[in-house]
Amino acid sequence: MRQSQESRPPSSSTGATVLSPPPPLPADAALFLDVDGCLLPFAPRPDAVEVPPALVDRLVALQTALGGALALVSGRNLATLDRLFAPAAFAAAGLHGVERRRAGEIVQASQIPAALRQVRDAGLAVIGAFPGALLEDKGAAIGLHWRMVAPPRAAEAATALRAFAEHALARLPGYQLQPGDRVIELRPRHADKGSAILEFLAEAPFAGRVPVFAGDDLTDDPGFQAVNSHGGISILVGDRPGSAARFRLSDPAAVHAWLGVTPRPPETPR
Ligand SMILES: O=P(O)(O)OC[C@H]1O[C@H](O[C@H]2O[C@H](CO)[C@@H](O)[C@H](O)[C@H]2O)[C@H](O)[C@@H](O)[C@@H]1O
């Protein structure tokens, strides 16, 4: 369907979509937050991210203020999200929507097909050819990362890892490729961030609230579409042409400012 001149988002002289900063968080929001590239700046490796205690403090305060209607919606698995944000326990969707649980619930990890174990072993051999590349084993999903491959081999690594993943997909019925920021992932395809958000919105304490979702990457677009379909607030973090988001924040620091994260005062020595 063609958009009318009036309904199209405004464009800059370069043609890039110009999105406004989001309005303040509504008091009756159902708040959904992506993690890497949104709440946390990118780190060299998946296990090198640091979650500032002040961010956890603020998310816990928002969780209370919103009657529990706050969920992390991430490509990480649920176990990793719990470890990163400990001691807090948030409702969460992991593996790009494949895993989902309410706050305080314990869930079994997803089933791992035997073929994925074989693909993982073959993938370890491929990344071995590129110093700095790594394979992230997330249980039912794997990620092949090249952020730490130094130029000039980074482009070659990206091509080789994408080609490996495309080839491996044929051995994994029910799986799809998930491109990300210097990563290609293989993950189950029966759910995405949009379906996870819609499932949260169908139940307490999220139902009947204004959905708000902030995220940065391709995997976040189904989430933007889900909140848009409910008249909510979709927020792109960073710059990515073609996103379905209606508002924009420049980076994780801007997300923190918008959420009202304030640094913890330094501890006084006793
Ligand atoms: O949906 P998200 O919460 O944004 O998760 C997406 C993927 O993020 C992680 O990878 C990215 O962040 C790493 C740490 O900063 C970085 O080293 C890597 O280059 C990025 O691609 C995570 O490792 C993946 O499992 C997530 O799917």
Image (tube, helix red, strand yellow):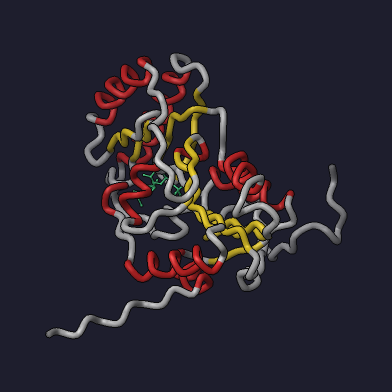
Identify whether 137 is placed above or below 70: above
Where is residue 153 shown, x and y percent of the image? 30, 39
Q: Is residue 16 visible?
A: no
How many marks overall? 0
User: Where is the N terminus found, in terms of image quarters?
Assistant: top right
Instruction: Say which residue appears at 43% left-offset and 33% top-offset.
Output: 185
Give the side of residue 157 with respect to residue 238, left or right: left
Which is more toward the observer, 209 or 25?
Answer: 209
Where is residue 51 shown, x and y percent of the image? 33, 61
Identify whether 180 is placed above or below 207: above
User: Where is the C terminus found, in terms of image quarters?
Assistant: bottom left
Instruction: Say which residue appears at 54% left-offset and 69% top-offset.
Output: 65
Question: Residue 209: which quarter of the image?
Answer: bottom right
Identify whether 59 is placed above or below 199: below
Identify whether 148 is placed above or below 110: below
Instruction: Say which residue appears at 64% left-offset and 48% top-offset.
Output: 201
Instruction: Say which residue appears at 31% left-offset and 33% top-offset.
Output: 137
Give the side of residue 23 with respect to residue 263, left or right: right
Q: Which residue is the extreme one toward the left?
A: 270
Q: Is residue 149 visible?
A: yes
Where is residue 154 shown, x and y percent of the image? 33, 41
Which is more toward the observer, 239 or 254?
Answer: 254
Where is residue 254 shown, x and y percent of the image? 49, 70
Give the side of residue 228 with respect to residue 122, left or right: right
Give the side of residue 79 with respect to residue 95, left or right: left
